Amino acid sequence: MTNALALTDVRRRFGKAVALDGLTLSVRRGEVYGFLGRNGAGKTTTLRILTGVLRADAGTVEVLGQVLKQVPVELKRRIGSVSQEQHFYPWMTGHELGRFVAGFYPTWDQPEFERLAKVLDVPLQKKSMELSGGTRTKLGLALALAPRPDLLLLDEPTTGLDPVARREFNDLVSAIVKERGCTAFLSSHLVDEVQLVAHRVGIIQAGKMRIEGEVPWLLESVRRVVTPLAFEPPPGFERVRGDVWRAAPEAWAAAVWPEGVVDERLSLEDVFLAFARTDAVVASSTPVDSLRASPPRLDGVMSAAPSAQGPEAGDAGRESLVPRNESEAAADGADSRPGDGGSTPGAA
């Protein structure tokens, strides 16, 4: 299967702060890819590079079969984008915003825009400033999908939505991907939502891809080993943190544990936390001195118009899942620098 997106050893710095540190990932055509990471991990910087708002300092960026340094206008017309914060002209109604955005996209489908607005219960006759945050997000999705893009980039779009609106949003994305055969790249830290809609998941931390694969494979590959005694792990096992280990599913199946040692399956949320947390391990059932493997280093819109230049809203002000160290705080600042506000239609 060919890739819709591929990043290879992509790097980006903001002064001394490292936002992306050799990020590598691949997104297959026709799938929903869940891009999981805590705030400051590098998710928004990645999305900004994919939409052409930022350039990578190094590495290879491939979008819809084109290897590029920046995203040309013709390619932007094949991409729809939705972010957490929707920045519309406040005096425009939904109908007016639709007509405005349509001018940037030769493939704009007005009947489809009106159908999507109806499905999402968006009152197009109202001005955008009269809409709730959740309704504005759904309007952004309708605007992003109306040009029938080949690639949909979603930057934490459902953060702040109520559970009903969140489910409606994700159900529509899943249905559109299945119906049209397009690709969706969903950046989020909401693990339960990603697990519901994603075919494959990548977990990013400190600007690096920590693990990537189909959800069932991830759950087979990362487990907790519970033991009252010190033990030597079999070949092919790597400690993630504390008593959480990763290995190929075949290695887990073939492992013969000493008496009293058992391995436990984890939820996707526990897998995510094992790779994303940076606080010290308070307690572990596996004595640290017995582990041979060293713990991995854990350092700290609407549809984007083709002529867009302004960056999207970053991660500023969002609450982290766990305490961060100084390095991560610096990276978070790089993801959300002052002046990097959202864009108005046609100026993103």
Image: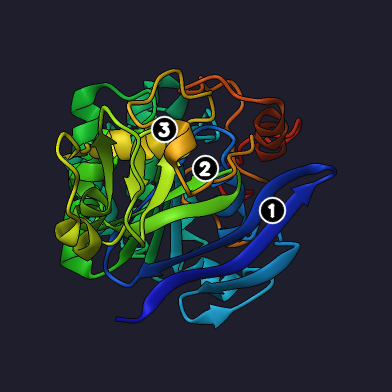
Using the rendered image of the protein, determine whether residue 285 is visible from the camera's viewpoint: yes
Write down the quadrant of residue 297 in the picture: top right
Camera-side mark, 1 or 2: 2
Image location of residue 139, percent across then percent down: 35, 39
The picture places residue 237, in percent across and down from the top left corner, at 36, 55
* Of pointers 3 and 1, the one earlier in the residue sequence: 3
**What is the C-alpha distance between the residues marked 3 and 1?**
44 Å
Expressed as whole percent of the image width and height from the top left, the position of residue 167 reads 19, 34
Residue in the picture at 44% in, 42% down? 291
Label 2 packing within 10 angstroms: few (<14), some (14-19), many (20+): some
Relative vertical location of residue 323 with respect to residue 100 in this rendering, above or below? above
- Classed neighbour count for the residue bearing mark 1: other residues with Cα under 10 Å, few (<14), some (14–19), many (≥20): some
Q: Which labelled disc corresponds to residue 295?
A: 2
Q: Which mark is residue 242?
A: 3
Between discs 3 and 2, the one toward the N terminus: 3
Cβ–Cβ below 8 Å for labels 1 and 2? no
